[in-house]
Image (cartoon, coloured by chain):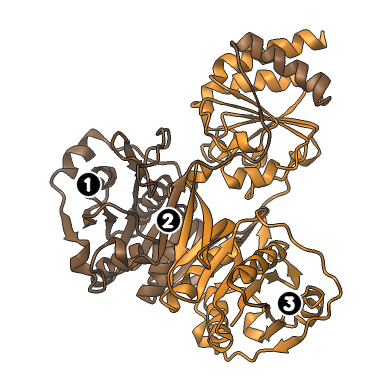
Amino acid sequence: MKIIVSVKQVAARDSALRVNGAATWLDESDLSYEMNEPDAYALEEALQLKEKLGGEVIVMCAGPARASQTIREALAKGADRAIHIEIAEEGVLDALATARLLAAAAEPEAPDFVLTGLQSDDLGYGQTGVVLAELLGYSHATIVMEVEPQGTMVRVKRELEDGWFQNVVLPLPVVLTIQSGIKKLRYATLMGIKKAKTKEVKTVAARELSADLTSDAAASQAAMERVYLPSRSKQTQILSGDAKQVAHQLVEKLRFEARVL
Amino acid sequence: MSVLVVLEQRGGKWNRASFEALAAGERIGQALGVPVAAVVLGSAIEPLATEAAGYKVEKIFVADHALLADYTADGLTAALEQIIQGVRPEAVVFPHTYQVRDYGPKLATRFGKAFVSDVVDVKTDNGGLLLVRQLFQGKLSADVKITGQPQFISVQAGAFRAGQPTAAGSPIEPFVVTLAPEQIRGKPEAPFREAQRSVDLSAAEVIVSVGRGIKEKENLPVVEDLANALGAELAASRPICDNGWLPMERQVGSSGQTVAPKIYFAIGISGAIQHLVGMKGAKTIVAINKDENAPIFESADYGVVGDLFEIVPALAEEIRKTKA
């Protein structure tokens, strides 16, 4: 089985987020980055599928040069090789533009499975996997909890709303967007980290992949005109002081103001 | 020209978010200066169409086909593709449901269009639409502009207030879609629920809920002690349950339980929308978080910015003093 895992590098979860001067995206000057968490679960699922079925896991990532760190991490955890679609310009692509790049890179590989996280922690469109499936002409399922290969088919358990689930049987090749938390994530071993250095990373420039992209950012139809801190609409009383004082104030408020305690 | 709102049903029952999407559609219609139509798709859905006609719209399109009885991404995409080609709307508006997440981007891609998902507000800018979305799980907002038409837009649950039906008797128009079984690749089985929950958080009066801020499983006693002091149920956001630190049945949010206690303590929970939808019905919300920009403070009545490992024990002590 050939399994592609599409991962994204995003700002680390605990980052202090500051908007850039042009208010078009983040000030990236002192951000640290990590693998998008849902994608880490997609990678884990891919590695476990390979352990079960044999074959290879190819990690695919569209991002600037710094994304090579995330690619190395995936290789250290056990992916066999990587494709890095390098996006030179600053700016943020919409899901369609990103998926076009990913589709162009994935298609010649003719994978059986393409796995990715259900959404990114930064843009949160939750679309890339679905768009990728449509562009490749593959079947797909989203918010997948369990993957059970059945020869040329796969049976997946999908999460619906309000605690409902549904099993769906789909033909291969298939794109699955994986829910977070479905398996325990592995750590890279020392041996894995060492081996990763010798694994193949094919780097392709974004504009080589897609003829319609005269500039990377121009390919987006959904453009962020302005990025800003959300304004507060609700009156939240912020209590301050040391822990003891705050605790005392809060209990007073809950007892005598909100009258809920 | 019009705005077309896609109403969602499953097994003959509405997803109520459909009518929030309709309200959003009206806002978008006003902004663009065009009327609003709606569409409902499924099999044997006449009663739903009649009900939808109670909302004042230009037209309710009804696409009734046996192959739309069960949701499949292939079936719904093919049907809506035909409807959009027939109706030629300027914008197509959906509720941001799990179902729309599954097929909406596919449909937009078929038209070569971007899909702006999970929109929380609509503004206008020189006659064009500005769609407000959240980034980084609500820590930042962005105004997004789409070039080209139709614009594909889904709206977040709770962001637009659904109107009431007025017995308007809006005209119903059948739309014949052509579908063949071989177009539909997915074979869906019947939806199911996991084993009965043994913990019913929906009845709890006081809930202490914990999120990533707790850092490690070994730190859970800090919040458990507060829950004990309050006589509260312990709950959690999704990552805590995903990690197996607390059982899944204690999860509050869109994929867990919906709660409405008198007091909800959100401890170390940043307040992603998936969590907020599960607890915004609480009478009083207290948030304790080290990040002053955490979106949870937007929903909280009382907020404490600081280290939960200092504040929570102090709070437990204060509660015990009060109750003594």
3D distance between C-alphas at marks 2 and 1: 29 Å
Residue in view at x 27 percent, y 70 percent: A104
Is label 2 or label 1 in front?
Answer: 2
Quarter in which the C terminus of chain B is drawn: top right
Task: Find numbered disc 2 in the image and state the secondary structure of the residue it sits on.
Answer: strand
3D distance between C-alphas at marks 1 and 3: 51 Å
Residue in view at x 42 percent, y 56 percent: A224
Horizontal relation, residue B98 to residue B198: left or right: left
Tell me where residue A249 appears, x and y as whole percent.
Answer: 71, 15
Q: Which one is nearer the viewer's eye here, B193 or B168?
A: B168
Q: Name the residue under label 3.
A: B57
Tell me, for residue A68, which label it has, or none: 1
Check the image and report above or below for A83 versus B301.
below
**Which amino acid does the dot numbered 3 rest on?**
Val
Is label 1 or label 3 in front?
Answer: 3
The chain shown in orange is which? Answer: B
**Which amino acid does the dot numbered 1 rest on?**
Ser
Quarter in which the N terminus of chain B is drawn: bottom right
3D distance between C-alphas at marks 2 and 3: 31 Å
Label 3 chain ID? B
Task: Find numbered disc 1 in the image and state the secondary structure of the residue it sits on.
Answer: helix
